[in-house]
Structures are given as C-alpha cells and as structure tokens.
Image (cartoon, rainbow, N blue to C red):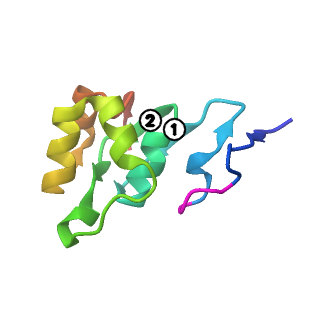
Amino acid sequence: RGNRALPVEDGAPGPMGPTRLELSKPVIAAIEGHAVAGGLELAVWCDMRVCGDTAVLGVFCRRWGVPLIDGGTVRLPRLIGESQAMDMILTGRPVEAQEALRMGLANRVVPA
C-alpha cells in the first residue's frame, strides 16, 4: 500500500529529498502559483505536471548565480529539449502556464 520508494544505488538521498528516489507509482505535480528553482526541479522529477492557468515556472535561481543542484539541468532538457531548457536556464525568465504547455513542460493547464 502507498507509494514505496525503491532503494537508490548508493543509498544517498538528493539534496532536496525525494528526487533521487525511484518510486513504485506515478507521481503527478499539481502546480498553482510559482514553481521556480527547487520547485521546478521537483516538478520536472514528476511523471506528469498539471498547471493552474496562472502558474509560473522558471529557473529563477540562475538570476543570482545559484545553480540547479538536484538534477534539474539533466531532467529539464530531457523533458523539453536542449534549446528550450537552455533558454530557461540561461535567462532565468518566467514561463507562464500556456507557454509551458506548448513547450511540453506542462501536460495540462486547468482553470485556477
């Protein structure tokens, strides 16, 4: 019962917690408001992302020279392609829900 975590090879959790775990069930992110920096990393770790129509996603930590530390620079390009991921990572710009849907970052956009 429940969502059991499968062991990670070296047994060490990621810096933000569950992002290095392999879970036994799909994980769906419900994004309302801002999902930026570590929140974006958790969202791209999920199997599916459902955004409210006012949601904003982004790599805002890059604005201050802080890197993504929990696999976001690997997962984001795999999800949306290298060019779009580089745009988000290098500029640190906000991406609204409809644009996230177009680029494949969001699976669905629903009314807030």
Which residue is identified by label 2? 49
Q: What element carries label 1?
A: loop
Residue that appears at 81% across and 39% down: 2
Q: Where is residue 89 in the image (x, y as percent from the top left)?
A: 21, 51
- In the image, the segment drawn in magenta is 12-16
Quarter of the figure that contains the C terminus: top left
Q: Mark 1 belongs to which amino acid?
A: Cys
Q: In this view, does 61 lie to the left or right of 75?
A: left
Label 2: how many Cα within 10 Å (few below 14, some 14–19, many 20+): many
Quarter of the figure that contains the N terminus: top right
Q: Does 9 appear in magenta?
A: no
- Residue most extreme to the right: 1
Q: Position of residue 51 (x, y in %)?
A: 39, 40
Residue 32 visible in the current orientation: no
Q: Are marks 2 and 1 in contact (CB under 8 Å)?
A: yes
Q: Is residue 72 above or below residue 65?
A: above
CA–CA distance in space, label 2 to label 1: 7 Å
Disc sitting over residue 46 in the figure: 1
